[in-house]
Amino acid sequence: MKKHIAVYPGSFDPITNGHIDIIHRGLQVFDEVVVAVARNSEKKALFSTEERVGIIRDAMADNCDRLKVDTFDGLLVDYVLSQGARVILRGLRAVSDFEYEFQIAQMNRAVREEVETLFMMTSVPYGYLSSSIVKEVASLGGDMSEFVPPVVEKALRQKFPI
């Protein structure tokens, strides 16, 4: 029987509880979810690609049998197909996310029509949450325990010692 695999791409700098919510819910729909950390040299990341992969693996250790954490560069749709997947999983927080994600999904479909994009609305507690906001709170010494898993909070405290 063929496995149904979804690829959940992003920078995950750092992964938040909102991302983890989408991963858990994706695992309820798909046999396997590949968390694909983008190697994007144009973005100034707080954590290296290797650090982000390690943090995600630690944060998601309980799901390691159905979860793969990997990196990619180049066209996302080519990476998706290389993983034996046909679905890109994306989380949406607000209408502004939809407008951007819709454009990307349409372009991906034009490049590789066999790849679909599935949008999941974030759960209510995470509708405002982003990696950028988490980094700002961390840089100012704020409490992050509601926003990120403990492994991420620890890593942020090392980057922003206050």
Image (cartoon, rainbow, N blue to C red):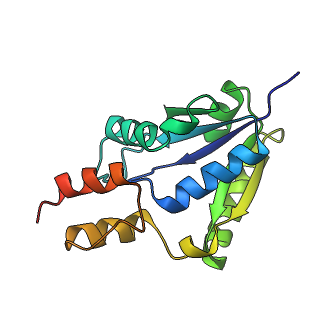
Q: Which residue is drawn at the image coordinates 54% and 56% (left, top)?
A: 19
Q: Residue placed farthest to the front in the image?
A: 62
From the top left corner, tell me how far across and down residue 128 is, in percent. 51, 76
Q: Is residue 72 left or right of residue 50?
A: right
- Where's the N terminus, which quadrant? top right
Please indicate whether residue 1 sits to the left or right of residue 150 in the image: right
Q: Position of residue 119 (x, y in %)?
A: 73, 59
Q: Which residue is at a point 32% across and 52% down the rendered structure image?
A: 45
Question: Is residue 88 in view from this perspective?
Answer: no
Name the outermost residue toward the top: 1
User: Dividing the picture into quarters, in which one does residue 142 lie?
Assistant: bottom left
Is residue 116 found left or right of 24 in the rendered image?
Answer: right
Number of numbered markers: 0
Q: Which image quarter is the C terminus in?
A: bottom left
Relative to 162, is 87 on the left or the right? right
Please say if 151 is above or below 62.
below
Closer-to-camera residue (110/159): 159
**Residue 147 at x, y = what percent?**
42, 66
Please determine whether, in this image, residue 95 is positioned above or below residue 50.
Answer: below
Name the outermost residue toward the right.
1
Residue at x 75% of width, y 34% of height: 31
Q: Please, which residue is most extreme toward the left here? A: 162
Q: Quadrant of residue 133?
A: bottom left
Instruction: Kindly tell me whether residue 66 is visible in this rendering.
Output: yes
User: x, y percentage for residue 154?
Assistant: 26, 52
